[in-house]
Image: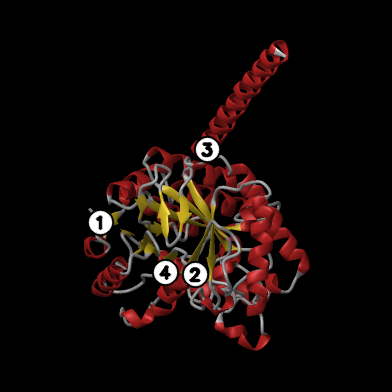
Amino acid sequence: MDVNFKLWSQINLIIMKMKTWILLIVILMATACQETEKNYVFVKGKNIYSAQGELLRLKGVNLGNWLMPEGYMFKLNDCNSPRKIDQAIRELIGNSATTAFWDSYLDNYITEADIKWLSETGINTIRLPFDYRLLTHDDYLGRNMHGYKYLDKTIEWCEKYDLYVLLDMHGAPGGQSGDNIDNSDGFPWLMVDEGMKQQVCIIWQEIAKRYANNTTVLGYNLLNEPIPHYFEKDNLKSNLEPLYKRITKAIREVDKNHIVFLGGAVWETDFSVFSEPFDDKLVYTFHKYWMPPVQEEIKEYVDFRDKYNVPILMGESGENEDEWIKEFRELLDKNVIHWTFWPYKKMDNTRSPMNFTKPDTYNNFTLYAESDRSSFSKIRALKDSLEGIKPEEIKALLNQFVENSKFENCYPNKGYCDALGFN
């Protein structure tokens, strides 16, 4: 009996030691997982926290007009999407020279110097709009599959200067807006086209896979300003949240850590399209332009935040006088709303933090681009009738445009910067 008792005692002791070791291993594994998760910015309730667990207030700007050129920032009205701008330039100087212009533009419009300056203003976030075509075999600004070069560089610069990057698909396959801002074909086909839905999921999954371990990347802004008011009669709004769920599911297969940012319908103003949050790492975004900077204008979003206990981001606003910018920014701060104002840089305009000079002969280009070019005969007639549009003249003014846009030739709009609370 004594022998059996001693034997059982030894066995129990061994079992207890094994349990202790197993428990220790489990604790270590859990701690390791927690440490991994802490490398990323995370969401908890209404708040966003840094990897170190500090309460984080996102304050930033959009790098608009860089990876997705917009007509109005080129001083154009009707010739107002990347493909239309590109076409006008090709008609004037030919394919090779146009590709050379876009290469120079993309390499110089935003550089490390811009990111360094922005980091010194006191902001902590860059929203980076891009056209999906940058990441595919579609011809875009003269080349294909060249976009990751610019995304990677921006992320590297932001890591160096302690800024977060929010990747924003401004132009999605098929178009989510059906207007110039998504470089589409005049209708938000993404909302109804199965092939386009599949493609946007594939592209976002590729992006997420590439940056899954990158902690400078704040998250993924799935679609910019989907379903404008033009398409109310088409009853597309009910398609938006299911598409968001589908894209998020594709992302979560390769990246379980980064935050997903969801924008409302109707130029990103309508949150009625949303039901209860379907993921534990969501931030909801709204855009607001040209309205009175008063509490009533943001009440819908604050109420949504309170109801579902989720963070909200004002992803775009601006394009207004300094006083308005100051009042709206202060309203957002008062309501503890994250913000990224639009845009960072514009030509010959005070409604942005950074400004640069318009080339002296630039109107020669805009006059041609805005004229009726609906037939080849009209294109030929324009070239015969307008002055200052010889290929070498257009090349020179476009080169001057790029030169002027370089950081060293830009100058801050002090009043606008003060309105945003920049250092």
Which label sits in the foreground, 4 or 1?
1
Identified by mark 3, the residue type is Thr
Q: Which of disc 1 and disc 4 is earlier in sequence?
A: 4
Q: Residues within 10 Å of mark 3 (few under 14, many from 20)?
A: few
Residue 340, given in percent of the width and then of the height, sits at 39, 61
Q: Is residue 328 above or below residue 361?
A: below
Q: CA distance from mark 2 to mark 4?
A: 50 Å
Q: Please indicate, yes or no, whether residue 134 appears anywhere in the rendered image.
A: yes
Reading the image, the residue beneath label 2 is 308
Dots 2, 3 in contact, CB < 8 A: no
Reading the image, the residue beneath label 4 is 363
The answer to which of 169 and 96 lies nearer the viewer is 169
Q: Which of disc 3 and disc 2 is earlier in sequence?
A: 3
User: From the viewer's perspective, is 250 left or right of 387?
Assistant: right
The answer to which of 289 and 274 lies nearer the viewer is 274
Q: CA distance from mark 4 to mark 1?
A: 33 Å
Q: CA distance from mark 2 to mark 1?
A: 32 Å
Q: Which of disc 1 and disc 3 is earlier in sequence?
A: 3
Dots 3, 1 in contact, CB < 8 A: no
Q: Which mark is residue 36?
A: 3
Residue 143, given in percent of the width and then of the height, sits at 64, 50
**Res 18 quadrant in image:** top right
Q: Which mark is residue 422?
A: 1
Q: CA distance from mark 2 to mark 3?
A: 27 Å
